[in-house]
Amino acid sequence: MVRSLSLANVLTIALLVVIAIPAFLAYKMLTDPVVMDRLMSSYREYPNQISGCTMREVKERAGPDMWSVSTGFAFHGSARWYIAVAMSTKPSDTEIAAHCEALKRIADSLLRAQPP
């Protein structure tokens, strides 16, 4: 049976082994959410124009979800200074508002404490 293979058949089998099978395996890996969770990090921002704070959701490769609420308190050119609180559980809307108010009070006290 092996002797009856033509050169075209041998090349086709070689292409399948060298290109098609690894490409299929890569495709399966990249579309598998569990594999992608282990390989990639994710980052989402939820700005709130009313409160002036931003909630961020971050997940490092294969790590737990982390949330933070932050506000900017000083800007100079392209430099930005932020103050934030980080959490391991997703905050509710009332917690976000409370954290935002506390961060603003801390930022105000930092700005007042600077020498003129």
Image (spheres, helix red, strand yellow):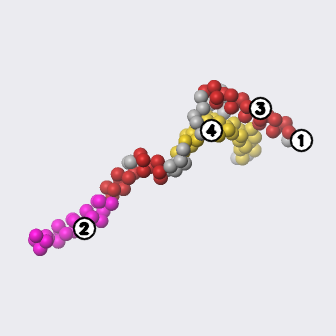
Farthest residue to the bottom: give it. Answer: 3
Q: CA distance from mark 3 to mark 1?
A: 19 Å
| Mark 4 burial class by Cα count in 10 Å: few <14, some 14-19, many 20+ | few
Give the label on residue 87, or none.
4
Q: Look at label 2 and name its amino acid.
A: Ala
Q: Is residue 3 magenta?
A: yes
Mark 2 element type: helix
Report the amino acid beneath label 1.
Pro
Q: Which-is-in-front pick, marks 2 and 3?
A: 3
Q: How many marks?
A: 4
- Decide whether residue 72 is among the magenta residues: no
Question: In the image, residue 44 lies at what x, y percent?
Answer: 55, 40
Q: Is residue 38 visible?
A: yes
Query: Which stretch appears magenta?
Result: 1-22
Task: Specify the quadrant that holds the N terminus.
Answer: bottom left
| Rendered image: mark on residue 14 | 2
The answer to whether 15 is drawn above or below residue 25 in the figure is below
Disc 1 vs disc 4: Cβ atoms closer than 8 Å? no
Residue designated by label 3: 105
Q: Which residue is mark 1?
A: 116
